[in-house]
Image: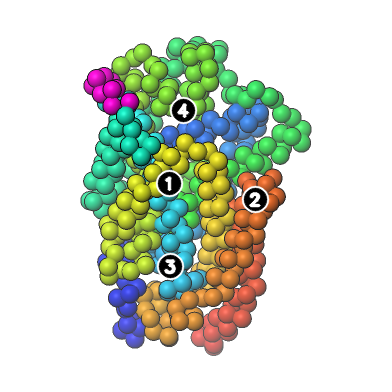
Amino acid sequence: MKSQLPVSPRLSNEDLKPDTQQKWGWYSIFAFWMSDVHSVGGYVFAASLFALGLNGIQVFISLLVGISIVLVFANLMGKPGQKAGAPFPVIARMSFGVFGANIPAVIRGLIAVVWYGIQTFLASSSFIILLLYFFPGMATLADGSFLGLSYLGWIGFTAMWILQGIVFMFGMDMIRKVIDWSGPAIYVAMFALCVYMVNLAGWENISFTLGDASLSGMDAIMQMIIAIALVSGYFAGPTLNFSDFSRYCGSYKQLKFGNLLGLPFNFILFSVFSVVIVSASIPVFGEMITDPVETVRRLDSGMITVLGAMTFIFATVGINIVANFVAPAFDFSNVSPQKISFKAGGFIAAFGSVLLMPWNLFNNPEVIHYTVDVLAAMIGPLYGIIIVDYFFIKKGKIDIDSLYTESEQGIYWYDNGINKKSVYALVIAGIVAIFCSFVFTALANYALFIGGFTAAFLYRYLMEPERVALHGLDLAKQS
């Protein structure tokens, strides 16, 4: 870093500094998305889209359009991180100011804490299946409970909590190795489970239309639009902080290729596997089961039960580490770099997830519904502000020195380290999105886009003087 802009200890540590090696290739990015897609939540989500009353072709069109939107935003959000080698909270300093970036960092970190606990709880369900398979006598521990969770549930939750912590303790290299092999392994297991279920059900009984009603005309189109919005919203969290991973990629070309394989191709293939297994559950069990853990639990085959349970353990642990451990690790570290390291930030999220008692949250669909809507309403504006700032205000240019300095000469210093215009845009757009979600409930599924576009237009308007000034500076340098 240049000596004329001194590095501030309040803005830098070894984890937040630019990654200069950038050893990741397209496969690691592809594997990242595999880990993000392959989970119990992803399985249930994919199956739910097929139960909206749409036929198979309509659902696949919705999936393709929705995941293509995610692909575009992944490429946009990943570019500044790849170029600077910096994580999401540091990239956010460009638009929010070097200290103002703590606002989006804390928002993203808190979102991750909520989902970290829920995903750990989901993984523990699979672990309990394994425990009861090998130690059936432990079923008696399900009778008593503490804080709303059975003693058996506590054993499963604690085991998954510790397993994820061990992986995280070894740092990003270990995380990369885990996601590099876990994604393909999960595909092998999903294929085996799919073949086994189809063999039990008979291929003639497999249907790609799972809903009771069949929609057509305008009703089908509106439902397809909702499905597209749901797909985009499902990946909003990990796509927002994608710089946390794109920073390690060697080139933007490899980044885009990894995104292409990891999103449209991977998501649709996983969705096909998921819906085939769900469809097969109807003739096999006499009812439709969208929970893969329950499907595995009901099977008579010991090998398939063990294989399936282990598959969903590693799948859910994979997405949890990728989406909900790494993000708050950087986000909370950004708040106080010298006191909170990357690992300390991750464990703050892990301990916070236990205090939330996610089993109670997960068992209350109404609470989850409101939580997801509010979070989507706050995530959308962050997209709008960061993308407009990087591509339209800063024209894709990054002053890396200014990202880590408290010097007033740094271009991201703004007003005492905070860009108040981005804060105004965030608050106003967030209020608009929340208002649309809870007052005009029909718009709740579109909160991500409403908040994003509102913030984008508002921020672009507020930052016009800065854009003109930067453009004039560039012309002066060229003359």
Q: Secondary structure at mark 2?
A: helix
Q: Tell me which label, 1 or 2, sits earlier in the chain.
A: 1
Q: Tell me which label, 3 or 4, sits earlier in the chain.
A: 3
Q: Note whether residue 373 is visible.
A: yes
Q: Residue at x 30, y 48 (%)?
A: 176
Q: Secondary structure at mark 4?
A: loop
According to the image, label 4 marks what residue? Answer: 291
Q: In whole angstroms, how far apart are the C-alphas of marks 3 and 4?
A: 37 Å
User: Circles 3 and 1: CB distance less than 8 Å?
Assistant: no
Q: Tell me which label, 3 or 1, sits earlier in the chain.
A: 3
Q: Secondary structure at mark 1?
A: helix
Q: Secondary structure at mark 3?
A: helix
Q: Residue at x 64, y 48 (%)?
A: 444
Query: Split into 4 quadrants, where in the image is the C terminus?
Result: bottom right
Q: Tell me which label, 4 or 1, sits earlier in the chain.
A: 1
Front: mark 1 or 2: 2
Q: Residue at x 62, y 61 (%)?
A: 431
Name the mark on residue 102. 3
User: Circles 3 and 2: CB distance less than 8 Å?
Assistant: no
Q: In whole angstroms, how far apart are the C-alphas of marks 2 and 4?
A: 29 Å
Verify whether residue 138 appears in magenta.
Answer: yes
Q: Of the residues shown, which amino acid type is indicated by label 4? A: Asp
Q: Of the residues shown, which amino acid type is indicated by label 1? A: Trp
